[in-house]
Amino acid sequence: MSFFSVPARCPGARRGGDKSLLVQEQVGFHLGITPEIKATGRQAAQLARDKYEAWLKSDRSDSDSPFKSDHFTIAVGGGNTVKAEYKALLELHARDINWLDHVRIFFLEDSCNEKQWESARGALVSHFIAPLAKILVTRYGKGDICIKLQLEPSASRKKIIRRILETMTFPIDLSGVEAALNSGDRDLALERAKWEARRYQAVIRERVGPSMSFHIIISGISKEGGIGAFTPYTPQLKQKKPAALVLEKANGAISVALNRGVLTAADSVSLIISGNLKLKALGRFEMEDSASFEQTVMETPIRMLRETREIAEKVYIFADDRALHFDEGLFEYKEKGRPVRVKSEVREGEEEGGVHMLLVHGFMGLYSYINLLIRLPSAWKVSALRRGKYAKQLPDTEVFPHYANALRHNILENWHQRRPTPVCCHSMAGIISDHLLNSVLRDYHGDLPELDSLKARDRQLIEALRAGGLFHIATWAPSDTCHIRQNFGVMNAHKRRGKTLDYSGPAKIYNTTADGHLVLNSEHRDSLVASPAVLEKLMNFPGTEAVVNTATLAIRRYLKRKGMKKIMSRQDAPYGHRILSSRVLKKVSLYGVLKEMNAAMHDPYEYQLRHLKALEAIVKYDIPYLVIIHRDDFMVSANRHIQEHEYLQAARMAKEGVRREQDLKVPARLVLLERAKGEELAVDPINPHFLILSTTHEGGGNARQVTAAITRFVNENVARAIEAGRIQPLASVAKWAGENQPRVLKRQGRPKSG
């Protein structure tokens, strides 16, 4: 066996990556997440090795061309991230791939007059071809390598590198274009670039076949979602027939590039992603969007790889943790004379002055909103607010009013710019929403004042909530402790006696008074009043904070040692859940969680009364309201939400004088998610409470329903505000209305002054 041949099964073929870390997402593409770029490169290199091995073992008689039958074809892009894969290929697979005989490399693009830019060819030569030559010479001897390359035995290292480059690669030649540009003749440069594009296209078609379909494409992406030579709004993105073409860049550069048709035609597409702020682009694979698909491709070119399920299934994305970070937002205000800083995870929107959604998470942490941050319409700015450390110093009675005050300041800052600000609350954040709505009261037990009698800032808060809407995702209220207790009993009976699981909890939470108001039935009222303050006593015990913080550090060390990414992958956890892992370990404070739980439960019956008062405020002040919950939520009662929805709907219809929910001008809407037909209820008490985190692949379907419902709800509310002249017209809303509900916008009036 020649030293250039490859064994049928190489013992080291699996060293480059752990296949268990590569998970196929529900929409088709495959995603691998690693702690740092070195591991990301190894995983990407393993894919290239696997695809090569599959090609080697396959019956290649039906290949598109004799060349593809004899050679494994790769098209590579530029960028720093690809270098990590080159390094891993050299370290792990220099021997188990027959590079010289089998592999032939083409380029996605090359460019002239591009400043501070390294070409794909330059990166390949410096970081792969030159090191590969050194490895081959060291391993097999210079004499044998020179014989293989048909060089004289005394050939220099430079000649060996040049001959390997000539053997393995098919470059784009822009020397003539560069000469024309240097002489100041741009027209000649463009003419030569077009000639080179035609030549390169002919070379690829002759060797690879008319479809220009490579065995694998290897590339990175930009933070704007650019791939290959294509940045957002490149007109040639519309061209789908495989070809090589000329691109004129805004900075004066001229590029010859393989087009969208080539990128989508490849047998496999391997994208390696590193560096900050790439998550927005990555998230566009699964997001809900009011724009047409082709518009999303123009906004984020990587979306082209989602055109069909068939194309998506050929895509493999390898990302490190740095690539999965959002921008950090900072908002400052004063509370009782003390400066307060509110940080947030921010995904910027495409539309200037457009919708700015505020996400308020539950006690389990900020990243419960990961799916909304990446999937909501690209026109919107989305901010997930952090809690901060300030609340840890506050008495229990002031914790949630403080959170509500921070949210209130954020809303009002946006409203002063007449920017619609929908507010989304998840889980324990329902308590924050209640305090926000009740912040217009002088005391929590008083009557709700008329809108005209409110203070100016209170009236502005209500106007802002009217324009954007308020929606709750599986939000918690104190009466849900009764629901949880019953479900624990059901779970215990299931484990001990095999009883059927049923997380529906108590059938009836409320009674209705003669004047139509809700009150807790006596059983739940007595249960809340008699709730023992076990957690409160624990929190007041000396040394509790130190003990809990020590436990937090110990848990972090344990999970880091075990490898959180591997734990997630073994559970076959989906996208949102896996990108959560190690980041939460760095952020979460168990003491902060306990502090919030204690603050929420320190006077449960009083807080339940405030919750009912908040429902009254929603009706009185005409605030659009949406609730999304799964029927089998272990933590939160769907039956409670159903009863509250029936109350709100009846009150709204009575106020507006209509008989059907669809005739309401101000919606009071409930989206009740169900298990798939035939699906068994999971014992897991967390699922499906985290509807927007998606702790299972089935939960991914829930997340898409959630984002679709939110998209419709927000656009309807903002459209009404535009029609009433309360905010400026928005192109994204007009487009959504035109495509989804043609009669939503009868007109886009001028905003009222003031």
Image: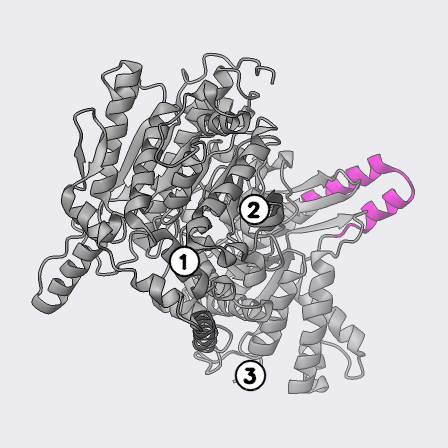
Residue at 36 percent across and 29 percent down: it is 618
- Look at the picture and state if 42 lies above or below 321: below
Residue at 57 percent across and 21 percent down: it is 728
Which label lies toward us, 3 or 2? 2
Q: Position of residue 128 (x, y in %)?
A: 67, 69
Q: Which residues are magenta?
A: 173-198
**Which residue lies under the disc numbered 1?**
577
Q: Position of residue 290 (x, y in %)?
A: 46, 31
Which label lies toward us, 3 or 1? 1
Q: Quote the CA–CA distance across marks 1 and 2.
A: 19 Å
Q: Residue furthest right?
A: 183
Residue 192: in magenta span: yes
In the drawing, does residue 661 fall left or right of residue 335? left
Q: Position of residue 596 (x, y in %)?
A: 41, 56
Q: Nearer the viewer, residue 342 or 707?
A: 342
Q: Secondary structure at mark 3?
A: loop
Viewer can see residue 240:
no
- Look at the picture and state if 177 lies above or below 621: below
Residue at 11 percent across and 63 percent down: it is 493
Q: Nearer the viewer, residue 491 or 147?
A: 491
Give, as a three-letter code, the residue at label 3: Ser
Residue 199: in magenta span: no
Quadrant assignment, res 696: bottom left
Q: How many marks?
A: 3
